[in-house]
Image (spheres, coloured by chain):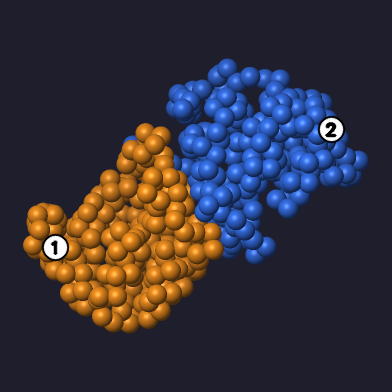
Chain colours: A orange, B blue
Amino acid sequence: MWVKLSPAEGTYNDGPGETGVKIAVLGTGNVGGALGRRWAQAGHDVFFGARDPNGAEARAVLDRAGERARVGTCADAIAAADVVLLAIPWDQTRAVLQAAGSLRGKILMDCINPLTSDLTGVTLGHTTSAAEQIAEWFPEARVVKAFNTLSAATMENPQYGDLHAHVFICGDDEEAKATVQQLAAALGFDPIECGPLKLARHLEPLAALYVYLAVFQGWGGDCAFRMLRR
Amino acid sequence: MWVKLSPAEGTYNDGPGETGVKIAVLGTGNVGGALGRRWAQAGHDVFFGARDPNGAEARAVLDRAGERARVGTCADAIAAADVVLLAIPWDQTRAVLQAAGSLRGKILMDCINPLTSDLTGVTLGHTTSAAEQIAEWFPEARVVKAFNTLSAATMENPQYGDLHAHVFICGDDEEAKATVQQLAAALGFDPIECGPLKLARHLEPLAALYVYLAVFQGWGGDCAFRMLRR
């Protein structure tokens, strides 16, 4: 278990926070666009992977991310990276990763939620999860579940008054989790260590709960889960 | 969708908060003991249902709850109540309710979590939940999922600085949910309307996540989930 960072301890802005991590961000939607831009601006080498690297969406994301960022195919982005953010639809995930060549040793940050088409449920769970399924398909990769319970608005800005949104993190590779924890803290999130990868069975339903509240109960994107303590 | 109460709106201590609700609290452990005592002290008629109404645990719970409370068999408690808190183990739930006679019109507040024996997972989920299973077994009852994501310490005291712990509530009967919302607010919780009963598929894994953090990650009972807003 790594040390929990908290804003009160002042570790966000002056912590060690590795820079220069080679990050592939697969997907140029709200999620990939927000996290990729912020990592690039925090000093990391971000390579966006896009279905159409010359399309308008990819170019717009690249423009916002600044000069440290690049864009190409998902396969090219993965080949150049040590850490890969999966911010693509669940039903494309296996094919995109299969097309990418070796994933040996690469850290896969999985923020995917396998939601039902009506957005109210998950299409798998309880005895498995998207994260565990990915780890089963690609055992040479180091899968970490993270960033899946957050709105795009919270990814842009994780601060809520004096409190910071949590990134719930689970995985079976301690070193990989520590890297993801640093990448989360570098963007101002308060990471929580949630145990082995099978805890993704609980984190994916948490995202479905979030989506329900945001979309169907009218909470919108400016809200985020936090564990209160005393 | 009922109006969300929040501490900032000052609705906790001076809200209407029906008193005199006839509540059966099934179970005299930490959960039933804490909520039953607090409802009794808030002016409700609490009837504890115990496996052994003359046992030491039942007597101790009754002593703490004060003179508005009673204790008897689960069947007697249910017969006398309009609202029933299920705070018994999941594997006893069906038999206890079957032994109770008619549940017609009664509100069942289900705070049960069908955890695996190692406490890291749920034994059913994703396409169903304990709450939905209870509703299927007893279609004449009005099942509301609530109070399942809280530690006993938070049930005793839901306040965390200026913030109050959430009670996540879902169910298919709007009037029943409104009653549960009032019973939660009366104890100082900040209730959240989470939609139809099938959302219990997400609330039960949230409890499993809570248990994992509390027990295996060392967070303990003095923590509670909250949705941050801005």
Name which residue lies at 74% across and 36% down: B25
Look at mark 1 in the image and give the residue it sits on: A52
Seen in the picture, residue A129 relative to A211 is either above or below; the reply is below
Nearer the observer, disc 2 or disc 1? Answer: 1
For the residues labelled 2 and 1, the Cα–Cα distance comes to: 67 Å
Instruction: Point out residue A225 in the picture as x, y percentages from the top left corner.
Output: 42, 47
Look at mark 2 in the image and give the residue it sits on: B76
Please indicate whether residue B89 sits to the left or right of residue A164 in the image. Answer: right
Q: Which amino acid does label 1 sit on?
A: Asp
Residue positioned most to the right: B54
Where disc 1 sits, the SS reads: loop
Instruction: Point out residue B140 in the picture as x, y percentages from the top left corner.
Output: 68, 32
Are the residues flagged by discs 2 and 1 in contact, CB closer than 8 Å? no
Q: What residue type is labelled 2?
A: Asp
Q: Is residue A14 visible?
A: no
Q: Is residue B91 visible?
A: yes
Please indicate whether residue A159 sits to the left or right of residue B116 in the image. Answer: left
Name which residue lies at 82% across and 40% down: B99
Instruction: Point out residue B49 in the picture as x, y percentages from the top left corner.
Output: 81, 38
Name which residue lies at 85% across and 44% down: B51
Please indicate whether residue A15 sits to the left or right of residue B141 in the image. Answer: left
Dot 2 falls on which chain?
B
Name which residue lies at 40% across and 75% down: A137
